[in-house]
Image (spheres, rainbow, N blue to C red):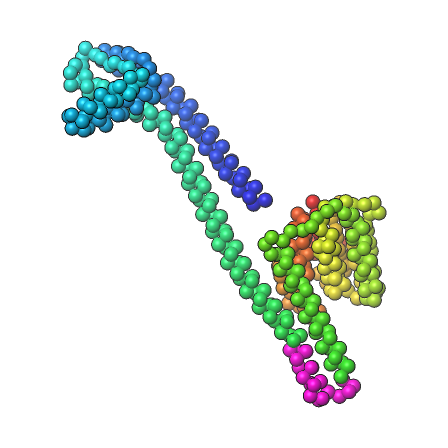
Amino acid sequence: MQKRNLKWFFIKNFLSILFFIYIAQGLLSFLYRQLIFPFLIGLLEMQQITISGSGSLLLLIIQLTLFYLASLLPGGAADYLLGLITNWTSDGLHIRISSPLYQGFQGTLLNLAFFFFLLFLLGLSLVPYLAGAFVYHKIVTCKINELLEEEKERQLDFERKRSLLLSDIAHDIKTPVTTICGYSRALSEDIVSEEKERDYLNAIYEKALRIDELITLLFEYVKLDSEGYSLRKKSEDLAELLRETVAAFYTEFEEKQIDLSIDIPDQPVPYEMDSLQMRRAVTNLLTNALRYGKEQGKVLVRLKDYSIIVADDGRAIDPDFEKRIFEPFSKENSARSTKEGSGLGLSITAKIVQMHGGTLSLNNAFGEGYTKAFLIKLH
């Protein structure tokens, strides 16, 4: 999208410059016809000057320019070059400027004046093109500088986020590792009673699972964000994929006594997608509803007009956190964060949806008895 906008920016400005040149040329033509040429004709008639000749005007301008440059050389060299130029431009414009009022040296001055007047007209004709080129150069230069500045800002932002990402990874891994190290050492040194051994082993197992989950999510996030990674898309039934994904969570929703409402059309909904990644995106939203939803609450899963809605009646998201909820390792500073979410699930979902050309958004006032809803809008 950005490349398309940039291309349109350059085309639009180039066409604007061409229009400016066209208008300027029209004004110059009007100036020639209404002012310069009538003035010149009146001056020639008043000074009794006659101009006659035939041939190419372009060759005349070149011939007169070369004559002028050759005349600046010493006598012998000037005569030799003038002879060569005369032979070379023999098919050029043969022109004669004469007046009974200007003879000899004054006649030479008259020819030079006419020559410089022709150069002036030629230069005046080129002014719109030179001005247009200068303005377009300034526009392109400013735009490139603006893009370079934006790229610099993006790079700085990327470095900042990467530093925060590494810091969050270290923090999230260190906590369960510390627990595992402490409990395993206690077990190895036989300082734990037999009644507590199973609790310690269960805690070690849970923390190991936590690390495994975090590393898996981190791997998925890095893979999706890596250069060269592309989705394996093919046309599949979006409705069936959604039904299968929800069915895999049915037991977990039952255990928490969550009322699961499903609103998915029976007819196929074909969509060009990477089914593995799209399933992962929906899974993350369902996991989010299961983890942060209300006990004995309700969850809605709906598919309508290529839009997937996952809503629940849990606590609404804080407005400040809502602005950064899709950033990696983002966690709300509340009791919500005590449920050991990785802060990566929604980031991965947003990335997957974006790679499919869609958008992921949060509606904090969904209605229908639900407090919030995540909306995947596919195109």
Is residue 126 on the magenta stretch? no
Looking at this view, is 165 or 68 the one in front? 68
Residue shown at the point (62%, 74%) measured from the top left: 174
> Within the image, what quadrant is residue 121 found in?
top left
Q: Quadrant of residue 176?
A: bottom right
Residue 264, image x, y percentages: 81, 50
Residue at left offset 37%, top offset 17%: 33
Q: Is residue 269 above or below residue 154?
A: above
Q: Is residue 285 left or right of residue 54?
A: right
Instruction: Residue at 50% x, 58% y: name it.
Output: 156
Say whether residue 279 is left or right of residue 117: right
Q: Main secondary structure of the magenta part?
A: helix
Residue 69 higher or lower than 295, as above or below:
above
Disc tally is 0
**Above/below status of 172 relative to 146:** below
- Which quadrant does the C terminus fall into? top right
* Residue 26 seen from this side: yes
Q: Which residues are magenta?
A: 178-196
- Residue 187 higher or lower than 325, as above or below: below
The N terminus, quarter of image? top right
